[in-house]
């Protein structure tokens, strides 16, 4: 499962660049390619975890996702999802990658009014077909599920406290660099990922 969470984390790091401030079309194409690499080889690696060549491909994709390439030409990544995910890991010891697969679809649903075009472009790019924002989010959820990662907090089997999650997010001033999150936004995102 930690291989799956690592694959999810490299995808999430790529998404942070995608939703960052600024426009860099070449960087966007790098991001799409990195995520497509994870989509192609991640499920194969999960079926054959001892396969050195498949692990190489995923490790190289992870290196490209985390070495700053996905931020080139942009002011910053967003990092709001990572901030929320870190709180879930803090409170419930949820593995980092799993926290991101729980939060990303909910976060995208919440910001879809502001970022519908950006979400649709991401989904259309990584899945090589024309998709709406909502269709893209659904396909991304399906992708995370195909990697055997949770997309709702309830799927972890952990007893959680919604109020405690919200309070901890607010106390820690969790927000994004590009898509700013206020207390009301955080509460809505939590509702979406429960």
Image (spheres, rainbow, N blue to C red):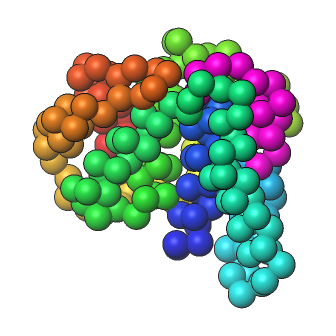
Quick check: 56 above or below 28? Answer: below
Please count the marks in the image.
Answer: 0
On screen, residue 33 versus residue 191, left or right, reads right
Q: Is residue 31 above or below residue 150?
A: above
Q: Is residue 120 left or right of residue 177?
A: right
Q: Is residue 27 magenta?
A: yes
- Left or right position of 8 against 174: right
Q: Give whichever of 76, 172 is nearer the camera.
A: 76
Residue drawn at 40 percent across, 64 percent down: 95
Locate residue 22: give its quadrant.
top right
Quarter of image, res 59? bottom right
| Residue 125 location, quadrant | top right
Residue 91, x across and y down, in percent: 22, 56
For image coordinates 59% across by 72% down, the residue present is 3
| Residue interval drawn in magenta | 20-34
> Residue 152: x and y, percent?
40, 48
| Identity of the residue drawn at 76% across and 32% down | 28
**Residue 189 appears in view:** yes
Q: Is residue 89 above or below residue 162?
A: below
Residue 11 position, x and y percent, is 63, 49
Query: In the image, is residue 12 above or below residue 56?
Result: above
Q: Is residue 63 left or right of residue 111?
A: right
Residue 119: x %, y % from top left = 64, 25
Give the camera-side residue of 9 and 131. Answer: 9
Camera-nearest residue between 142 and 117: 117
User: Does residue 41 show up magenta in the picture?
Assistant: no
């Amino acid at each position: 499962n930690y291989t799956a969470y690592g694959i999810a984390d490299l995808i999430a790091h790529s998404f942070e660049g995608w939703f960052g401030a600024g426009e860099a079309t070449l960087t966007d194409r790098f991001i799409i390619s990195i995520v497509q690499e994870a989509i192609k080889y991640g499920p194969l690696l999960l079926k054959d975890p001892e396969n050195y060549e498949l692990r190489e491909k995923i490790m190289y994709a992870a290196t490209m996702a985390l070495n700053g390439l996905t931020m080139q030409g942009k002011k910053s990544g967003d990092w709001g999802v990572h901030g929320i995910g870190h709180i879930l890991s803090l409170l419930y010891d949820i593995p980092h990658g799993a926290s991101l697969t729980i939060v990303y679809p909910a976060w995208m649903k919440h910001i879809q009014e502001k970022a519908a075009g950006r979400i649709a472009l991401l989904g259309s790019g990584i899945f090589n077909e024309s998709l709406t924002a909502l269709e893209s989010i659904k396909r991304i959820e399906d992708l995370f599920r195909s990697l055997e990662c949770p997309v709702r907090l309830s799927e972890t089997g952990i007893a959680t406290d919604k109020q405690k999650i919200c309070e901890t997010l607010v106390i820690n001033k969790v927000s994004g660099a590009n898509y700013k999150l206020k207390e009301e936004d955080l509460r809505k995102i939590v509702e979406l990922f429960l």
